[in-house]
Amino acid sequence: MLNISEIKQLFKLNGLSFTHGLTNEEFTQIEQTYDLRFPPDLREMLSHMLPIGNRFPIWRDLSQRGIASMRQYLNMPLEGILFDVQYNQFWYPAWGERPEDNKVALEMARQQYAKVPPLVPVYNHRYMPTEPYEVGNPVLSVYQTDVIVYGANLEDYLQIEFNRKSYEGIDFASVKPIEFWLDLDRPI
């Protein structure tokens, strides 16, 4: 269970804004609109407080423009992987042999990406995997195929992101294994 009052205090100390949390109806509408499922601990936090600001996801804006913008945000991990497949010869070994034709490689990467645990944005290019669907998934910094654990869990991540704990303080041994994403993890 998250310490919501501590998280709110952390936000205030860092000059970050938040508003009232999402309702069950809003969660349902958001999850249906984007075909996603919030990890339980992120859902708990967002039900108590919704961070606002230019690097936080804008979950309440379900206008046509807001949805298009959020879809881009949600697709950033895929687009980053496809960029590295196309321009940096990235290929995940479990996908088998890389096709020589770049268009075929990109299509195969897109198909394989559909099988990996989905990510939900938390802040900027920090994401949480939605699988397994349980409390305590790590928060990942995802920039193309440069992926690192940025918190063993949501609370740990917030402490690190907002300078209450050092990155070196992550207990990497306690980080829950996440298929595909942690295979890309590259420690700083």
Image (cartoon, grey):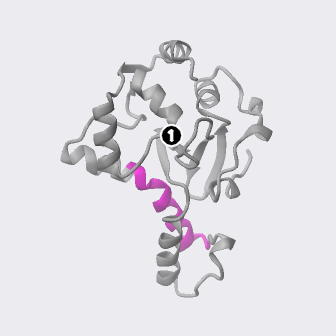
Q: Could you tell me what secondary structure mostly forms the magenta stretch?
A: helix
Residue 161 sits above or below residue 66 on the image: above
In the image, 102 versus 157, the foreground residue is 157
Residue under the image location 52 percent in, 47 percent down: 130
Q: Position of residue 129 (x, y in %)?
A: 55, 47
Q: Position of residue 1 (x, y in %)?
A: 58, 23
Residue 186 sits above or below residue 163 on the image: below
Pointer 1: what residue? 39
In the image, 180 versus 165, the foreground residue is 180
Residue furthest to the bottom in view is 100
Left-right relation of 49 to 150: left
For badge 1, the amino acid type reads Pro
Numbered-mark total: 1
Alpha-carbon neighbours of circle 1 within 10 Å: few (<14), some, or many (≥20)?
many
The region drawn magenta spans 73-89
Left-right relation of 27 to 151: left
Residue under the image location 64 percent in, 38 percent down: 150
The answer to whether residue 95 is magenta is no
